[in-house]
Image: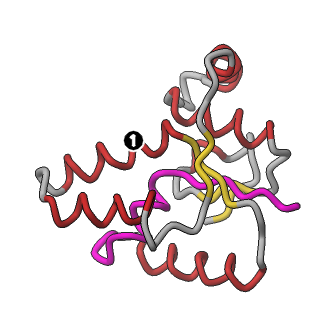
C-alpha cells in the first residue's frame, strides 16, 4: 500500500485547465494512474477548502461548482475522502503547533494533511505548496 495524500491546490489544478499548475497536475495524475498507487486520499477539510476556492475564484459560477462536485462525488472522482473524527481534531491541532514556525505558517487544513499522511504512513503528498518540504515527501 502506497498512500498518496492530495492537497486542494492539486485537486483544483487537475479540474480547471486554466490553472497555472494544470499541465503538471495532469502529468502527475497520469503517473499515479500508471503506477497504480493506492490509496489516493484527502480529507473533508480539503474538500471544503477546494469548494471555497472555486466559489471565490469563479464568483459562485454554478458551472464551475458542478465541475468540483463531479470531482468529489461524481464520475470524475479518483480518490477517497477521509472524514476527521472529533478526537482527530486535537491531533491536527498538535501537528499545527509542532510544525508551524514564523517562517513556515501552516493552516489548520495543512496540519490535517500532515496528520492524514502520518495516519496512513503516507508515501508522498501531492501539493504545489512548498511549506510541506522538510516535513513530508512532496510530489509536485
* The N terminus, quarter of image: bottom right
Q: How many marks?
A: 1
Near-viewer residue (71 or 109): 71
Q: Is residue 23 above or below residue 113?
A: below
In what element is the residue under mark 1? Answer: helix
Looking at the picture, tell me which residue is in the foreground, 16 or 79: 79
Residue under the point 68% across and 47% down: 133
Vertically, is 18 above or below 122?
A: below
In the picture, the quarter occupied by the C terminus is: bottom right
Q: Label 1 belongs to which residue?
A: 49
Question: Quarter-wise, where is residue 116 in the image?
Answer: top right
Residue 21 locus on image (x, y percent):
42, 70
Going 51% across and 67% down the picture, which residue do you hit? 77
Residue 72 placement (x, y as % from top left) = 45, 57
Q: Residue at x 48, y 43 (%)?
A: 46
Left or right of residue 123: residue 100: left
Q: Crowding near pointer 1: few (<14 within 10 Å), some, many (20+)? A: some
Residue 135 vs 75, above or below: the answer is above
Dividing the picture into quadrants, the one containing residue 57 is bottom left
* Whole-percent x, y for residue 36 in the image: 77, 77
Q: Position of residue 15 (x, y in %)?
A: 38, 70
Write down the region rendered in magenta. Answer: 1-20
Q: Residue at x 61, y 24 (%)?
A: 100
Quick check: is 16 in the magenta stretch? Answer: yes
Amino acid at each position: 500500500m502506497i498512500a498518496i495524500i492530495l492537497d486542494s491546490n492539486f485537486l483544483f489544478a487537475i479540474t480547471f485547465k486554466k490553472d497555472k499548475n494544470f499541465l503538471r497536475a495532469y502529468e502527475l495524475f497520469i503517473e499515479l494512474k500508471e503506477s497504480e498507487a493506492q490509496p489516493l486520499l484527502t480529507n473533508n477539510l480539503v474538500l471544503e477548502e477546494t469548494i471555497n476556492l472555486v466559489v471565490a475564484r469563479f464568483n459562485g459560477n454554478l458551472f464551475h461548482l458542478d465541475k468540483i462536485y463531479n470531482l468529489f462525488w461524481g464520475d470524475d472522482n479518483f480518490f477517497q475522502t477521509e472524514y476527521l473524527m472529533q478526537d482527530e481534531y486535537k491531533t491536527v491541532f498538535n501537528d499545527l503547533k509542532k510544525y508551524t514556525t514564523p517562517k513556515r505558517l501552516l493552516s489548520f487544513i495543512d496540519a490535517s494533511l500532515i496528520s492524514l499522511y502520518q495516519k496512513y504512513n503516507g508515501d508522498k503528498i501531492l501539493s504545489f505548496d512548498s511549506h510541506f518540504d522538510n516535513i513530508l515527501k512532496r510530489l509536485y
